Amino acid sequence: MAIVINIDVMLAKLKMSLTELSELVGITMANLSILKNGKAKAIRLSTLDAICEALDCQPGDLLEYRNEDGSIYDWD
């Protein structure tokens, strides 16, 4: 997968658990785990909005593009 969702990084920075985020956002633990573990095929913008609000971050703090070899995309 070329798009990586870095929920775990943001949770660690804020010292917040997945359970706390689940309660704040109103999303099941199962669905948050799917996002966290990179198993999601899509994410609704309303879900992304709610997560960003709960974590006080921008979508770019959560989403990252990586090349097929796993490296971060280099524009040069």
Image (cartoon, rainbow, N blue to C red):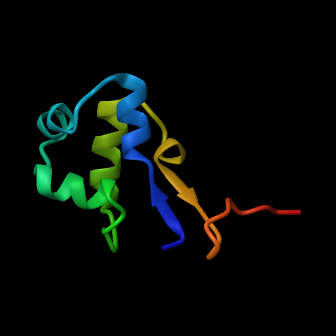
Q: Position of residue 57 (x, y in %)?
A: 45, 33
Taking depth in this image into account, of 70 and 24 the one nearest to the observer is 70
Quadrant of the rendered image containing residue 8: top left
Q: Position of residue 4 (x, y in %)?
A: 48, 60
Q: Position of residue 53 (x, y in %)?
A: 33, 34
Q: Is residue 49 shown above or below 14?
A: below
Q: How many marks?
A: 0
Outermost residue, right side: 76
Outermost residue, top side: 15
Taking depth in this image into account, of 60 and 69 the one nearest to the observer is 69
Q: Is residue 42 shown above or below 13?
A: below
| Residue in the picture at 67% in, 59% down | 72
| Residue in the picture at 27% in, 27% down | 16
| Residue in the picture at 37% in, 39% down | 52
Q: 3 left or right of 10?
A: right
Quadrant of the rendered image containing residue 2: bottom right
| Residue in the picture at 38% in, 30% down | 12
Q: Could you tell me which quadrant the C terminus lies in?
A: bottom right
Q: Position of residue 74 (x, y in %)?
A: 79, 61
